[in-house]
Amino acid sequence: MNLTKILTIVLFAISIYLAYYLYSSVQNTIDERNSIAEKEALIIERLMLIREAEFVFRKFMENIPRIGIL
């Protein structure tokens, strides 16, 4: 094998590695964004549940007659 073929094979292998590295970094970013979006959706759902519970509690407290200490 001459030097040109050896350099071609080595540079091709390096380019394959760099392409995989680039793909992997982009895919990790996409996966991270999806994970964050899922977590945000769960948090929003829980906050809405808490807000509804606070609303129900306030309505409940309005219906209770007040006595001197409360």
Image (cartoon, helix red, strand yellow):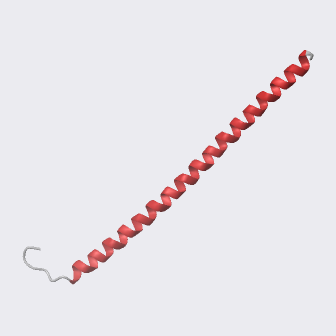
Q: How many marks?
A: 0
In the rendered image of this protein, does residue 34 appear above or below residue 44?
Answer: above
Q: Quadrant of the C terminus?
A: bottom left
Q: Quadrant of residue 56?
A: bottom left
Extreme right residue here? 2
Tell me the residue at 57%/48% (across/down).
32
In the rendered image of this protein, does residue 29 appear above or below residue 9?
Answer: below
Nearer to us in this view, 62 or 19: 19
Is residue 57 left or right of 34 when viewed as pictured?
Answer: left
In the rendered image of this protein, does residue 11 appear above or below residue 1?
Answer: below
Tell me the residue at 65%/45% (across/down).
27
Is residue 10 left or right of 3 when viewed as pictured?
Answer: left
- Give how far across and how far down residue 55 sits, in percent: 32, 75
Q: Quadrant of residue 61?
A: bottom left
Is residue 34 left or right of 16 when viewed as pictured?
Answer: left
Extreme left residue here? 68
In the rendered image of this protein, does residue 47 appear above or below residue 59?
Answer: above
Q: Quadrant of residue 26?
A: top right
Extreme front residue here? 1
Tell me the residue at 35%/67% (across/down).
50
Q: Quadrant of the N terminus?
A: top right
Tell me the residue at 86%/20% (across/down).
6
Nearer to us in this view, 70 or 3: 3
- Give how far across and how far down residue 47 sits, in percent: 40, 64
- Give how far across and how far down residue 49 sits, in percent: 39, 69
